[in-house]
Image (cartoon, rainbow, N blue to C red):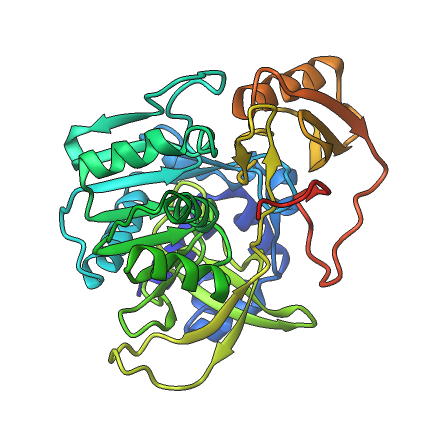
Amino acid sequence: MQLKKIIHHCYFNVPYYRDLFRALKLTPQSFQTVDDLQKIPLMDKNTVIENYEKLVAWKRKNILCRVGSTSGSTGSPTAFFRDYESINFENASVWRHWRQAGDFGKKRVTLRGETIVPAGQASPPFWKYNSANRELLMSGYHLSLDNAPSYIDALMTFKPKVLYCYPSTAYLLAKFFKHSGQQYCFDSIFTSSESLEPDIRTFIEDTFDSRIYDWYGQAERVAAIAQCPAGQYHIQEDYSIVELINTSCGDELVGTHLYNFVMPLLRYRTNDYVTSLSDNCSCGSAFRMVAKILGRNYGYILTPEGYRISITNHIPRGVDNLLETQFCQEKQGELIINVLTNGKFSEQDRKRLVQNTLAHTSPSMRVIVKEVDGIPRGPNGKFINIINKLEAMN
């Protein structure tokens, strides 16, 4: 029912789909089952960029909506409109995931990629308190060996029950706790936005004597995968229509919106991959299972102050004429940004990219922007966002 509703809406209210359906001689009546979606060609991020205005619904342009931005896996900034119905459903899906793991209004600490305090701030506090959610928002950009004692003291004083984080920041925090000799136990840990490797999971869970519950999503909001209490990953089937397209890199996630009527995406290629499972889960869920989410690993950038920054998706936002962005580091305190452009990349665009980099890494960082003809892929065909040739922390 919901799929038919959004197909009908696309046909009558979204210029891109109106033209596409007419060219393919399709009408809303052409879609009676999920399998009928295959009558529509796959779309990707470039399709969105090339047809941006035509993908916004006529009847939703004046309705309150929110923009979700992403640099994606290739560092090319794109904004996606979301209406409040889709945002509310997104929140409900995430809250269901939290509640299944036992988090229902507990005190929590969030350690992700948001800018909590200025990048150049040299002394604590590197956090702010959000009283509405009983939440301590901590800066992931300032988490370093020198600042670790202040982070640990703040956590021990606040006494959160739940940790929300990237796997990389949770891993770094766990290493600092291990190094300090202090112990802390969370009721649960929620990770997202990066691949969670088995050895990283084990170290974090052992250090904090806690279970990790992982979540996969993306700014486009076309697919979601949540880890259940039994430890299995389940595609959230009521969140969107998800197809698994077999490729040499694994099964690619292709998603179709069910609730976003302001900028609906049908059969959108996420460029993220999974390995699927056909078993039944002991948790009782009928949602399909996947064994592993592939291709979301991140390196890190080392700042002059010693901070390790693993999330760079904020940096290209607001910079025009970028197709791909790759961050390379061979010296501490110096960052080379390889950019593939559309040929219209201006000096103003370059300055904006440098300013964004300084704001999200360090004001002392030396930034070199290099325009390149192409950025090679990794061995599995995936884009490598960060290349760091510096020695990793032991």
Q: Quadrant of residue 65?
A: top left
Q: Nearer the viewer, residue 49 or 345?
A: 345
As drawn, 150 above or below 179: above
Q: Nearer the viewer, residue 247 or 22?
A: 247
- Where is residue 325 shown, x and y percent of the image? 69, 36
As drawn, 58 above or below 202: above
Q: Residue at x 36, y 24 (%)?
A: 126
The answer to whether residue 239 shows anywhere in this view is: no
Tell me if 173 is positioned left or right of 311 in this view.
left
- Where is residue 75 shown, x and y percent of the image? 63, 39
Q: Residue at x 41, y 52 (%)?
A: 192
As drawn, 118 above or below 42: above
Q: Quadrant of residue 290?
A: bottom left
How many marks overall? 0
Q: Nearer the viewer, residue 94 or 113?
A: 113
The answer to whether residue 127 shows anywhere in this view is: yes
Q: Nearer the viewer, residue 111 or 4?
A: 111
As drawn, 277 above or below 381: below
User: As drawn, which residue projects farthest toward the right?
Assistant: 373
- Where is residue 327 shown, x and y percent of the image? 69, 36
Q: Residue at x 27, y 40 (%)?
A: 109
